[in-house]
Amino acid sequence: AWKHLCPSPAGVLGFECDGPEPHSETLLARRQQHFARPQKNYYLKPPQIERGWKDHLFDIEGRSYLDMVNNVTILGHGHPRLAAAVGRQWSLLNTNSRFHYASVAELSTRLAALAPDGLDTVFLVNSGSEANDLALRLAWAYSGARNIVSLLEAYHGWTVASDAVSTSIADNPQALETRPAWVHPVTAPNTYRGEFRGADTTDSYVRSVVKKLTELDAADEKLAGFICEPVYGNAGGIPLPKGYLDAVYAMVRARGGVCIADEVQVGYGRLGDYFWGFEEQGVVPDIITVAKGMGNGHPLGAVITRREIADALEKEGYFFSSSGGSPVSSVVGQVVLDILTEERLPENAQVVGGYLKARLEALGQHFPLIGAVHGMGLYLGVEFVRDRETLSPATEETAAICDRLLDLGVIMQPTGDHLNVLKIKPPLCLSCESADFFADMLGRVLEEGW
Ligand code: PLP
């Protein structure tokens, strides 16, 4: 068996392999043949990445790339302190989360302390999808109802329940036809494009939610809850209109539903001054879901809620995750929080993100293809349009820009429902030099072609 394992990419198994590493082309062919499903919207010929350091990645030929899309490795790549802590914990113990050990208690306590008062009960899981599935189960158990209102053009994960509330047309084109009857999508409050463009009052933006809730009331259908990202992530980090969540949360709670904030992508320091996205809206949710950066790439996620909501699930359901909150995961979670705090990475996100946003907006003055620069902290979106009046999405141009950026040493990916947005979500240790490099390279590409 070891002989078969050995020819996998050198170094991954931590011991010498016989023979040279397979050439990238060979591995790519193997990947296409045996890896279940290559990611959509990604390079046809991705570079074969071998290692990473801070905000950079390096391929097998030694080429370096600025990693502008990571969104998971928030501390940066190759953090020696995290590697040492993981190695130490592996050599001490990793096992089923069923046992009692110190790190799970400590991580849960720290997460509860990070959450608003009253949200003091933590479930540990392995991913954002699991966290959202669990949040939906909690909403069902607590409310005794089934109906969930979610936003169109949202992504909450791939597991059965989180996929059902992911009505992003780009990520999940079948979702609109096949979604279960308990999912009630409403138009997202996109302030830049679509039905609400130009609206200036909260009332206009909540109109779609009011309509949906009125329909449910009329049909005597009880509400279980509402789920959304507190910053409109899929569209490139567009802040929700002022007062939006306050108004929606009040309507949901008046009907006995719970409010779920999906912080998987935008939370945990990425937004700079706001550790959680819901702080930007000045609201407190009933359930917070978190993953991605929380484990810096290690599979780790959490649901943070009130005890009474957690207890509702205990009464009528069962929650157990073999590896969610394992000894290694819990140590990873704690060391990530230590480093995030000690290296003041949210502050770096605020400062460098602000600097980068200003540079991108300056590019927007020169290049009409840039329709808008969205976002805050190190969650930014550059939206490309063919016409600033009609906002016709520049989808092909965005793909070509990403390909050219790769040639120039920047990893970037088109996102959003029209695949016309560069979603900028680098490690939070992004340096000002790297921000400059990105803005310079984007300027160069735009100068060349558009
Ligand atoms: N929620 C949001 C907002 C996400 O962006 C994602 C992943 O992209 C998820 C949930 C799902 O997380 P995971 O991929 O860890 O299952």
Image: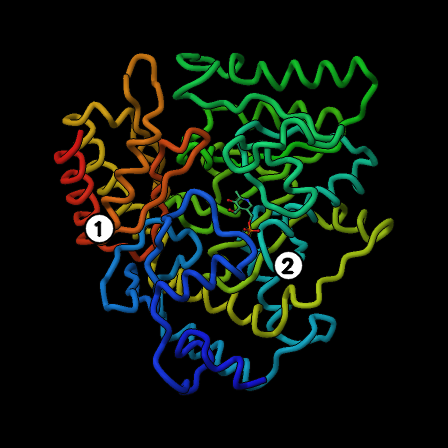
Q: Residue 204 appears at what percent x and percent y?
A: 52, 12
Q: Which residue shows up at 76% across the image and 28% down it?
A: 181
The reply, left or right, for residue 72 in relation to residue 330 is: left
Under circle 2, the secondary element is strand
Q: Residue at x 66, y 27 (%)?
A: 177
The answer to whether any part of residue 334 appears in the image is yes
Quarter of the picture containing the C terminus is: top left
As drawn, 13 above or below 72? below
Name the residue carrying label 1.
407
Disc 2: which residue: 125
Q: Up-down: is 284 above or below 328?
A: above
Q: Which residue type carries mark 1?
A: Asp
Q: Name the residue at the right extreme.
A: 316
Identify the image quadrant of residue 251.
top right
Label 1 Cα neighbours within 10 Å, binned few <14 / some 14-19 / many ≥20: few
From the viewer's perspective, is 437 left or right of 65? left
